[in-house]
Image: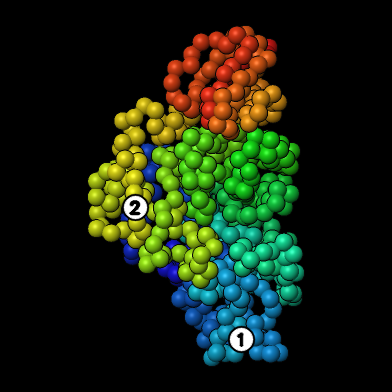
Amino acid sequence: MADFGYDVADYIDIDPVFGTLADFDRLVTAAHARGLRVILDYVPNHSSDRHPWFLESRASRDNAKRDWYIWCDPAPDGGPPNNWLSEFGGPAWNLDEATGQYWYHAYLPEQPDLNWRNPQVQDAMLEVLRFWLDRGVDGFRVDAIHHLIEDERLRDNPPDPDWKPGMSPARRVIRTHTMDQPEVQEMVAAMRRVADAYPGKRLLIGEAYLPIDRLMAYYGAGLSGFQLPFNFHLLSTRWDAAAIATLVDRYEAALPTGAWPNWVLGNHDRSRLASRLGPAQARVAAMLLMTLRGTPTIYQGEEIGMTDVPIPPERVQDPWERRVPGLGLGRDPVRTPMQWEAGIGAGFTTAVEPWLPLARNWSSVNVAAQERDASSMLSLYRALLALRRAEPALSVGAYVSVVAGAPDVLAYDRWDEATGRRLRIALNLGDAPQMLSGFAPGAKVLLSNYLDDRSGSTQGTVPLRPAEGIVLEMPTGA
């Protein structure tokens, strides 16, 4: 595992570290018995350099699988064929001395890119989807989909004039010819056709860090692509009411007709919410994520307010941090073990020392402790989930932006068109109290992220405490 398993040596088996296919089948059966869906991480862009396909491809220039990967002769000076850069630093080309050609890798040299222009590769990788769908999985998160195809002419990427020292070395160039090529959409549509051939609804989620206008293409013509192209834009937007309101309006306006939105506030690549925003605003962020229109994605551990964990140099696992140290690009701090309880290994493992260190606060910040605390972050997430299930206005209703009329306050309505029921969400993104006015008498607070009792009707004004978010039931006709 050169990159946490994103270097796949066998697409149709389970790594013995984790168990067997029989174990996996039991997991799927048990999950389905509990009403849970199972989504797999599918890594189509690259395999491991230990995959039999690559070992064959590397064997000789005339091997039948040579064209399953991207090979190129050296430049006239013997160096890499062009200026393409690896996401993890350095050239994106690695020389195979035995055959005298370079192979392309968008990530590590141990992760050679598959050549999706080759129909045989397409067939083999679509067969991987069928293998797991036949075993009952409910869908896939499709990794790094925007890297799937590169410029056929291997043209140099243009330099990025905005790059500065201290930024990721990969950002020295604008990835015009190595990301989001037009042919990617054909491959997305092919994946969707495979999923749609199975009974029930099989979900495809696409990982693509792209501007909003380009992201929309991944829904596909006539919604024939991903049901959910991941929307990561909240991750890079300032924690500011006006900035977030503008983002939400832009995203909603860009959605194709009938497309379903989604929102992400944390994942395995970005700093945790409680570290980025602080514990108080992390509770506001939870309310934002769970009340916007669309599917929310919660990264494990956010529901208990886990924080980034400092990783000493001798414990670093992430190849990105090892290759480009000191720039804060490493992902280990957000990938530490889930904190289930106060016992050994936080209930995640009985090992004396897990692969990454536990947070120092694991004995107090854990699921078991928060289940006993009615005001905990876990209790807040459960209250928000219960409210979403109970209120069609939140689960499927329309989104309408609202001018809050107060500094640092983000406000919007969720409206159930079938019943006319309207809920107003007001989020104080600042650390000072705010007063909202202009409400018709009779608005009721259904939930505060403080999780205390704010029941009773308003009389035209609503106070907000620092870092408070509320959901209000608006009177009919308001």
Neighbours of disc 2 within 10 Å: few (<14), some (14-19), many (20+): many
Is residue 135 among what the camera can see? no
The residue that label 2 is drawn on is 358
The residue that label 1 is drawn on is 101
Identify which amino acid the numbered label 2 is placed on.
Answer: Leu
Look at 67% across and 48% down and name the residue there.
219
Where 16 falls versus 212 (above or below)? below
Mark nearer the N terminus (2 vs 1): 1
Look at 58% across and 33% down and name the residue there.
429
Residue 27: x and y in percent read: 35, 50
The Cα atoms of the two marked residues, 2 and 1, are separated by 44 Å
**Res. 175 image quadrant:** bottom right
Look at 62% across and 55% down and name the residue there.
208
Where 410 falls versus 122 (above or below)? above
Is residue 427 among what the camera can see? yes
Residue in the foreground of this view, choosing between 76 and 73: 76
